[in-house]
Amino acid sequence: MLGFAHLFASRLVKALAILIAIVVMNFFLVHAAPGDPAMVMAGEAGAADEKFVEQLRQQFGLDRPLHEQLATYVGKIAQGDLGFSYRQQRPVWDILAERLPATLILTLTAFLLALAAGVALGTLAAITVGTWADSAITVVALLAYATPIYWIGLMMSLLFSIQLGWLPAFGYETIGAGYTGLAHAADVAAHLILPVITLALFYMAGYARLTRASMLEVRGQDFVKTAKAKGLSQSHIVTRHVLRNAILPVITVAGIQAGQLVGGSILIETVFAWPGIGRLAFEAVLQRDYQVLLGIFLVTSVMVILFNILTDILYGLVDPRIQAAR
Amino acid sequence: MLKLSSSSGDFWKAFARNKGAVFGLVILAGILVLAAFASVLFPGDPWDMATAPFQPPLSEGSPLGSDMLGRDIAAGIAHGARVSLLIGLTSTAAALAIGVTLGALAGFHGGRVDDAIMRFTELFQTIPNFVLAVVLVAIFTPSLTTIVAAIAIVSWPPLARLARAEFMSLRTREFVQAAITTGQSNTTIILRQILPNSLSPIIVSASLMVATAILLESSLSFLGLGDPNAMSWGYMIGAARTVIRQAWWMSFFPGLAIVLTVLALNLVGEGLNDALNPKLARSRG
């Protein structure tokens, strides 16, 4: 248990260092951007009113040396002040907090689905290696890997909502339906199906390929032969011996790809009008609302760090040796 | 250059054994031809109105239909191929320059230099890379240069890790030790001794990275962050998204072009992997 606490603490320190680096990066992005930093923060040049820009200059001490400005900026972020969106006339953090739950539901569900389905398909391909099922899974994985996710999303909504009418094409819930309780949850779940599957598909393909390769490698090792010699059943060997070892690199890669998954939510939420951070990013791009965009960059980075901690915990659950070793 | 295969004949034999790779190479050649002859096949500006708006595929004068402003979809795809390939290649070259340089320095020097570079790499691997690309292109205003730079900045870390691992293992080999003993400078050793020997895995990764870069570019232009003067596949899909109910072809065909290009590049990358790393290929599956 102590080992786990230690691992967790060192993880937190690392996470904090990464966060500080990102805040500093945000600061320099604003300053490196073409034009006056105050104008950049206010949004597209010329659109903001002079008074507000002047106020920003004062607030961030834009006439003082760069390192003092940096200190002011980091201090503000540390207090949870991510700036003010001139376009929306609201603090950036309020806007983000309102959108965060929808994105968390979407990305977390997609992440778990991609892992579960990817490992299941990869295992199936590895057991049936060389047969049509194996080839089919390989081909699907190859295609999913080559297809832009926003296009898959569009084609899925074209097929399943516009042509077949099975699932809602966009949004978070049926507007004006006034569902409550279970009916509301079912309504949201129906809206969630297409975006989650679209987002998960790409990663699922990767995890399936990786699980297949990893299982084929583990299968030839001595301890598996021992298990066979002991007369254990095929299913027991596959689940307890081969899969449990083969899954470790998959979890590692899943942790590394968490960042891409969160980034992919920008595209998915844009396609399906899912009212989360990703959709907000698209709107912020259209309006050139840089304060909001930089806030999104920071918040999504925090999400990635949390996903990484989640995969660490998963890793520890699957492989108890990790805890003992540290 | 490619020491793992003794001659180019062996290389082609190994490459051709992978049927998928040959298939990919054929598609890729087709796309290259399309890009090269875009202005011969489809003269005129792809942004100009060519026919009536909302023409379905197979209608007179527009084999793949026209978009909501009467622009020819086929012409857009042909001209978009140029942009996709150009951005894919240049941003990969830029990512190679950053990644291999950092990875080589880290792997060759080890110690503190390695620590510092790997921390930096880790930072860039944690950052949600597409979000960073969006932020970079939005803030520095979309143009071919900013798009290429943004894609390179978010995609170099895997190359750095790969180059580092190669340099670390090659550094301890006798021929490198011999070069150190004969007093060659670090730069010479890195460029003349180690780099040529670590090229094959780097070439394979780079070929796969061109595919990723094309996907990234299309995603950026789908969000409206493409170069406003360059017709691109992602832009076509993004612009036609709102009328998908009435006109599926406007977003279907450009998407198909992306899938084929990226698939072809991935297949070729796998074929290169089989041909350049024969040991790895045989131990697989």
Image (cartoon, grey):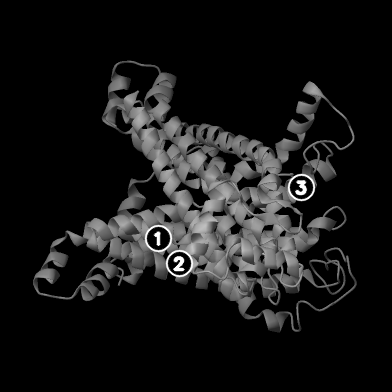
Q: Nearer the viewer, mark 3 or mark 1?
A: 3
Residue at x 51%, y 54% (from the top left corner): A74
Residue that carries the numbered disc 2 in the rendered image: B95
Estimate the spatial distance between the alpha carbons at disc 2 and disc 3, rounded to whole Å.
33 Å
Can see residue B228?
Answer: yes
**Picture quarter containing residue B56?**
bottom right
Give the camera-side residue of A201 and B260.
A201
Residue at x 79%, y 30% (from the top left corner): A187
Residue type, numbered disc 3: Ala
Quadrant including the C terminus of chain A: top left
Residue that carries the numbered disc 3 in the rendered image: A273
Q: Position of residue A194 (x, y in %)?
A: 72, 40
Tell me the chain of label 2.
B
> What is the crowding at mark 2: few (fewer than 14 residues within 10 Å), some, or many (at least 20)?
many
Q: Are marks 3 and 1 on the same chain?
A: no
Residue A166, compared with residue A70, is above or below; it is: above
Residue type, numbered disc 2: Ala
> What is the crowding at mark 3: few (fewer than 14 residues within 10 Å), some, or many (at least 20)?
some
Residue A156, compared with residue B233, is above or below; it is: above
Q: Position of residue A38 (x, y in %)?
A: 64, 67
**Picture quarter containing residue B144?**
bottom right
Residue that carries the numbered disc 1 in the rendered image: B159
Element carrying mark 1: helix
